[in-house]
Image (cartoon, rainbow, N blue to C red):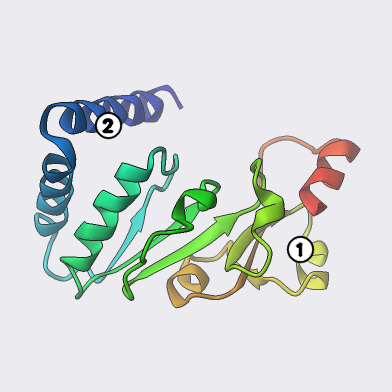
């Protein structure tokens, strides 16, 4: 969608400018300010409903913000999981590695999310339902399955790639 794409681009540019002009401290301060501006009743925050982690400094900034807000559970899906390798993740953070990226073979035994062409395929693979809500990711479920619900029919090649 054009409008949401524009917002994501502007947010990304704002983060880059913050980092360039103020470093990590400015990014952490800005992200933390946004979290603290939320209603006090917010108990769970999903990072990125679209998009992904793009730089290690960005991940480190979020880890500091998450640590500074222990009363909130944060969670995220990512295809950029190799950037998290040496990062201490706070106890109030859940990360699910998303299949469909260039580092799929490195996911191995980590909590993950995978898209399946059909419900039967998801059930056969013994993945929890991730279509109804994000509760499996919030709870730290290891294998989260989503059934493809796009607006077009998949080709046989696409079906095969979804299952790999």
Which one is in front, 87 or 117? 87
Kindly identify the residue that appears in the image at 42 percent across and 22 percent down: 2
Image-quadrant location for residue 84? bottom left
Q: Position of residue 30 (x, y in %)?
A: 13, 44
Which one is in front, 104 or 123? 104
Helix, strand or loop at mark 2:
helix
Q: Position of residue 37 (x, y in %)?
A: 9, 54
- Residue highlighted by disc 1: 119
Q: Position of residue 120 (x, y in %)?
A: 82, 66
**Looking at the image, which residue sits at the far front?**
86
Which one is in front, 91 or 51? 91
Helix, strand or loop at mark 1:
helix
Kindly identify the residue that appears in the image at 66 percent across and 55 percent down: 106
Kindly identify the residue that appears in the image at 67 percent across and 37 percent down: 151
How many numbered badges does the structure rendering display? 2
Task: Tell me if residue 49 can be seen.
Answer: yes
Kindly identify the residue that appears in the image at 34 percent across and 23 percent down: 6
Q: Is residue 79 above or below residue 132?
A: above
- Residue highlighted by disc 2: 11
User: Along the horizontal axis of the image, is 134 left or right of 9?
Assistant: right
Image-quadrant location for residue 67? bottom left
**Looking at the image, which residue sits at the far right?**
156
């Amino acid at each position: 969608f054009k409008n949401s794409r524009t917002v994501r681009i502007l947010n990304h540019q704002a983060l880059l400018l913050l980092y360039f002009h103020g470093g990590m401290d400015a990014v952490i301060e800005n992200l933390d300010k946004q979290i603290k501006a939320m209603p006090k009743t917010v108990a769970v925050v999903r990072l990125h409903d679209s998009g992904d982690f793009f730089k290690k400094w960005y991940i480190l900034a979020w880890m500091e913000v998450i640590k500074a807000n222990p009363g909130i559970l944060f969670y995220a899906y990512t295809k950029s999981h190799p950037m998290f390798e040496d990062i201490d993740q706070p106890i109030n953070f859940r990360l699910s590695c998303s299949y469909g990226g260039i580092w799929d073979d490195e996911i191995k035994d980590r909590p993950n999310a995978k898209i399946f062409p059909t419900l039967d395929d998801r059930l056969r693979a013994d993945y929890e339902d991730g279509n109804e809500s994000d509760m499996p990711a919030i709870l730290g479920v290891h294998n989260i399955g989503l059934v493809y619900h796009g607006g077009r029919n998949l080709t046989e090649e696409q079906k095969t790639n979804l299952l790999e």
